[in-house]
Image: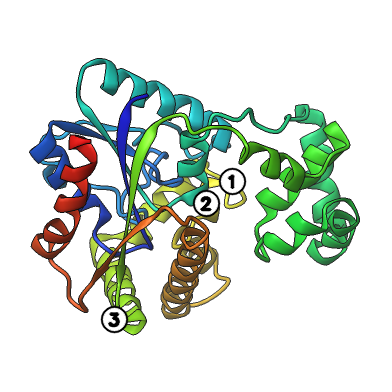
């Protein structure tokens, strides 16, 4: 079983820099586990690492799809496994870096995915959701799969539709498939490290500053370009934090300053959800950082664990 390193944690904690530094020290390559860095032409709002930030380290699963595509978890897992297996076959170290916990879990597990329905069924469910509204749709899902309904965040149309799709296709709740999947052995021997800040308020300040930098770097222009190229505001890609709010401002639904405030608030809430997801994993090794963390601090805490794991 091949060994891999996972670098995860909430947004704005320095995962990219640590992943690159470890790859340089241990002969590794990075496999992105970010559900929005998958998309081409979405660079600023996703904090996609620049070529300079990658420092010559090969990165996989960046720019793998067009923003018009509906990129699924199963598609990611298949592509990421191919990338990891290829890296291992060349005697190099795969470093899976990103904050999308669902993607990481799908990559690491060996269980099959819940069944998918036809394009026609997905279109039917989407139309029903739009017609009846989220609250009524949730009531229907609650009767079929109360666990999934309770777990899915409000406004997450994609996952609500997916849970109902699984039930309609199989007659079984998605939560039951998830339970069964945890019984399968892991696909890889992995060490999972999670960066976080000791002070939650310090993390939120970092998030706010990152959003301000994104605006300075041209987030508004990036979103405007995507919309002008024909990318629908309803597409999966445009539901990403930063893109959804900016698209609304561009279309006149709110002011630019209101959009920026909503992006900051949405990013802070996302960080809380990421932390909640990560706390489910008892084997995760946490790396708590100071209020203004540096790469040197993260490396000093991570390297002993990485060395010990690789030497076993």
Name the residue tied to disc 1.
Answer: 235
Query: Cβ–Cβ below 8 Å for labels 2 and 1?
Result: yes
Depth check: 58 or 228 in front?
A: 58
In the picture provided, is 143 more to the left or to the right than 138? right
Q: Residue 244 placed where, x, y %?
A: 52, 60
Residue at 52% across, 34% down: 109
Q: Secondary structure at mark 2?
A: helix
In the picture, the quarter occupied by the N terminus is: top left
Element at badge 3? helix
Most distant residue in the top direction: 89
Nearer to me, 46 or 17: 17
**Which percent across, then down, holds residue 188?**
40, 31
Q: Residue at x 20, y 76 (%)?
A: 290
Report the residue at 88% width, 51% height from top: 144
First reached walking from the N terminus: tag 3 or tag 1: 3
CB under 8 Å between callouts 3 and 2? no
Name the residue that disc number 3 marks. Answer: 202
Q: Give the residue pinned by disc 2.
A: 238
Residues at marks 3 and 1 touching, judged by CB atoms closer than 8 Å: no
Identify which residue is drawn at 46% across, 64% down. Answer: 246
Is residue 290 found left or right of 32 in the rendered image?
Answer: left
As drawn, 19 above or below 136:
above
Disc 3 to disc 2, C-alpha distance = 28 Å
Q: 10 Å neighbourhood of mark 2: few (<14), some, or many (≥20)?
A: many
When the figure is inspected, residue 134 is found, relative to residue 78, above or below; the finding is below
- Secondary structure under tag 1 reads loop
Q: Position of residue 289 (x, y in %)?
A: 23, 71
* Residue 5 horizontal side relative to residue 128, left or right: left
């Amino acid at each position: 079983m091949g060994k891999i390193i996972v670098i995860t944690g909430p947004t704005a904690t320095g995962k990219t820099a640590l992943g690159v530094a470890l790859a340089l020290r241990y002969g590794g390559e990075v496999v992105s586990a970010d559900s929005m860095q998958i998309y081409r032409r979405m660079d600023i709002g996703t904090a996609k690492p620049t070529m300079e930030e990658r420092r010559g380290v090969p990165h996989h699963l960046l720019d793998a799809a067009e923003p018009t595509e509906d990129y699924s978890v199963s598609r990611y897992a298949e592509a990421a496994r191919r990338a990891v297996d290829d890296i291992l076959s060349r005697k190099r170290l795969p470093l899976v870096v990103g904050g999308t916990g669902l993607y990481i879990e799908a990559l690491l597990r060996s269980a099959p995915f819940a069944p998918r329905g036809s394009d026609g069924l997905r279109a039917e469910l989407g139309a029903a959701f739009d017609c009846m509204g989220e609250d009524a749709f949730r009531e229907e899902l609650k009767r079929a799969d109360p666990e999934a309904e309770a777990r899915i965040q409000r406004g997450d149309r994609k996952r609500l539709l997916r849970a109902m799709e699984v039930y309609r296709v199989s007659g079984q709740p998605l939560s039951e498939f998830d339970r069964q999947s945890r019984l399968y052995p892991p696909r890889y021997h992995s060490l999972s490290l999670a960066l976080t800040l000791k002070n939650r308020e310090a993390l939120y300040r970092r998030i706010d500053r990152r959003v301000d930098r994104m605006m300075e770097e041209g987030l508004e222009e990036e979103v405007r370009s995507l919309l002008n190229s024909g990318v629908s505001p309803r597409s999966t890609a445009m539901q990403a934090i930063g893109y959804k709010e900016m698209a609304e401002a561009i279309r006149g639904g709110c002011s630019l300053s209101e959009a920026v405030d909503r992006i900051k608030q949405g990013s802070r809430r996302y960080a809380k959800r990421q932390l909640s997801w990560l706390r489910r994993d008892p084997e995760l090794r946490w790396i708590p950082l100071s209020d203004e963390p540096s790469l040197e601090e993260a490396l000093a805490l991570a390297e002993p664990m990485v060395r010990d794991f690789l030497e076993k």
